[in-house]
Amino acid sequence: MRFSTTSLSLAALTLVAVTMAAVGLLAGAAAGQSSDDAQTSDDAQSDDTGEVDWEKQPYIIRDGKVDYGTYNGFRRYHSACHTCHGPDALGSSYAPALKDSLNALSYSEFLDIVVNGRQNLGAGKESVMPAFAENIDVMLYIDHIYAYLKARADGKLGRGRPDRLDPENDPVYKEWKASQ
């Protein structure tokens, strides 16, 4: 049975709503980290309790190892995004380096571009970012992809497959596991 465009659009909207709920769940896990738990960046802003703003620092890096979400973001990025944006988010002749773009984009701007796509025309060059609203492998893990890209943009994560924190010491993994 084929889905109609309306069904797909409704499914995409539902998927975005579920994704935003997941962002809140993982944001809570990341926000619950103490300043001792996270590798902080100059851009990360903490409140009076020492909790880090998830949008500014959605990743945890300890002793060179990343949390579950950031690690999964690496995997998801390299399965869906690297074809255009290059390995390790370094860009290509086809699409910009997301490692650099995440220094200028907020999470909501990033989400808008991924969900709706983008078309840039100028200087005799046309570039088109397709909409990924209906790609479940991207939308369910958009916050993980953002965490990976933000860690790369902040210079806190180098090239290649990162090592992962031990699950029993990873608050993001624990939060995810508890939600299952």
Image: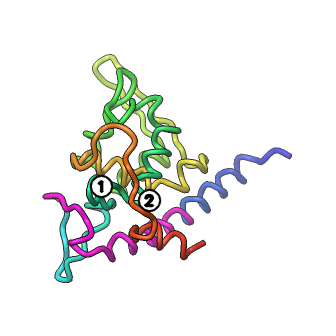
* Residue at (33, 61) in percent of width and height: 58
On the rendered image, what quadrant is the C terminus found in? bottom right
Residue 143's x, y, as percent?
A: 43, 57
* Residue at (54, 53) in percent of width and height: 139
Within 10 angstroms of label 1, few (less than 14), some, or many (20 or more) residues? some
Q: Kindly give the residue lying farthest to the right in the view shown.
A: 1
Q: Could you say which disc has been placed on residue 68 in the image?
A: 2
* Residue at (61, 54) in percent of width and height: 12
> Hey, what amino acid is under mark 2?
Tyr
Residue stretch in magenta: 18-43
Question: Who is closer to the viewer here, 42 or 2?
Answer: 42
**Residue 51 figure quarter:** bottom left
Q: Which residue is mark 1?
A: 106
Residue 38 is a magenta residue: yes
Residue 59's x, y, as percent?
A: 33, 59
Q: Kindly give the residue lying farthest to the top in the view shown.
A: 124
When the figure is inspected, residue 150 is found, relative to residue 97, above or below; the finding is: below
Question: Who is closer to the viewer here, 137 or 169?
Answer: 169
**Relative side of 78 to 134, left or right:** left
User: Which of the marked residues, 2 or 1, is nearer the chain's N terminus?
Assistant: 2
Within 10 angstroms of label 2, few (less than 14), some, or many (20 or more) residues? many
